[in-house]
Image: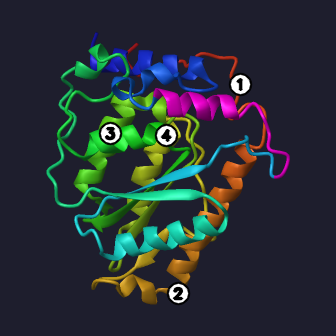
Amino acid sequence: MDRRDFIKKTMAAAAAAAVVSPASAILGGQGNESLSASTNGREAADGSNGIAAGKTLKVLLVNGSPRTDGNTFCCLEEIEKQLAKHGIEAEIVQIGRRPVRMCVNCGGCRRNNGAGCVFDDDACKEITEKMAASDALIVGTPVYYGQPNGAILSVMQRLFFSAGHLVQNKPAAALAVCRRGGATATLQTMNMMFEMMNMPVVTSQYWNIAYGAGKGEVKKDAEGMQTMRTLATNMAFLLQKIHAGGNSSPQRDERPAFTNFIR
C-alpha cells in the first residue's frame, strides 16, 4: 500500500466513523477513561447551557514559534484569556526550539493501530496526546518567507496523517504573525490542512493576522489583538453550539470519493 492509498483508507475510515472517534484509537491506550467519560457525558445535559454534565470544553493552542514568549505567544495568550471569559479551558503547547522530525513516509503509523506517529521523541507526540482530550485546535505561527514555520508544518502534517481521527470534526483556526507581509499566504496554507480533515474553520472579524517585529511589539497592534479576541469568542460560541446536545459531528451518508488525473 503506497502513501496515496493509505490516505484514501484513512480518510474513508475517519468519515465512516462520523460521530465520535473511538477511545481505542488514543495513543497507547492512554486517556481512554477520560475520553469515554467525556463521550458518555454528552448524552446528559446539565439543564443550563445544554453542555453535557461534567463536560469541560477545551481548546488546544499550539505555538509554532521557536520563541516561547514572542509575538505569536502574545496572540495565543490573548485568545486564552478571552476563552476563559466564556468558560472554555485552554492550554498553550510550545514547540520551542526542540528539533522536530518531518514525515518520512515510513509507513509505521499504518501498523500502529491509530496510535499516532512512530517517532515519539519530539513535540508531535505531546500534541497528539493532548489533541485526543481537546475539542478544538488553534495553531499560531510566525511568517517565514511567506509561509508557516517549518516546524509547525512538520508537526501538523504528521499529526493529521498518523492520527487524523483525533481531529475530525473539531473546530480549528490558524493565526499568523508577521513584520510586514506574507501572513495571508501563511493562513491559506494552514487552513488547507483543516479543510481536508473536516474541521470547521473558525473565523474572526478579519483575517487572523497580527503585526509585530520586536518581542511583544504585537500588543501595540490594537486591531490585531481585537481580532484574536473575536476569534476566541467565535470559537467559544461554535463549541458551545456543537456540544449543546445531540450529535457533535455531522452525519454523512456518503463515503469519500478519490480521483486524480491518472485514474
| N-term-proximal mark, 1 vs 2 | 2
Residues under numbered marks 4 and 3 in contact, where contact means CB atoms less than 8 Å apart: no
Q: CA distance from mark 2 to mark 3?
A: 32 Å
* Left or right of 257 in this view: 219: left
Q: Amino acid at mark 3?
A: Gln
Residue to which mark 1 is pinned = 251
Which of the two discs, 4 and 3, labels the residue nearer the N terminus? 4
Above-or-below relation of 102 to 227:
above
Relative to 226, residue 260 above or below: above
Cα–Cα span, label 1 and label 3: 26 Å
Label 4 – label 1 distance at C-alpha: 22 Å
* Residue 91 on image: x %, y %: 45, 57
Kind of residue sitting beneath label 1: Gln
Front-lying residue, 38 or 196:
38
Mark 4 and mark 1 lie on one chain; the one further toward the N terminus is 4
Q: Earlier in the sequence, mark 1 or mark 3?
A: 3
- Report which residue position mark 4 lands on: 133
CB atoms at circles 1 and 2 under 8 Å apart?
no
Of the numbered discs in the image, which one, if any, rests on residue 243?
A: none
Q: Which residue: 50% across, 17% down?
A: 13
- Label for residue 157? 3
Rendered-image quadrant of the C terminus: top left
Q: Which residues are magenta?
A: 32-48
Q: The residue under label 2 is which amino acid type?
A: Ala
Q: Quadrant of the N terminus?
A: top left
Q: Which residue is mark 2?
A: 222
- The image shows residue 223 at horizontal and vertical percentages of 55, 83
Q: In the image as oriented, which residue stretches furthest toward the top?
A: 1
Quadrant of res 140: bottom left
**Image x and y of residue 141, in percent:** 35, 62
Mark 4 and mark 3: span between their CA atoms?
19 Å
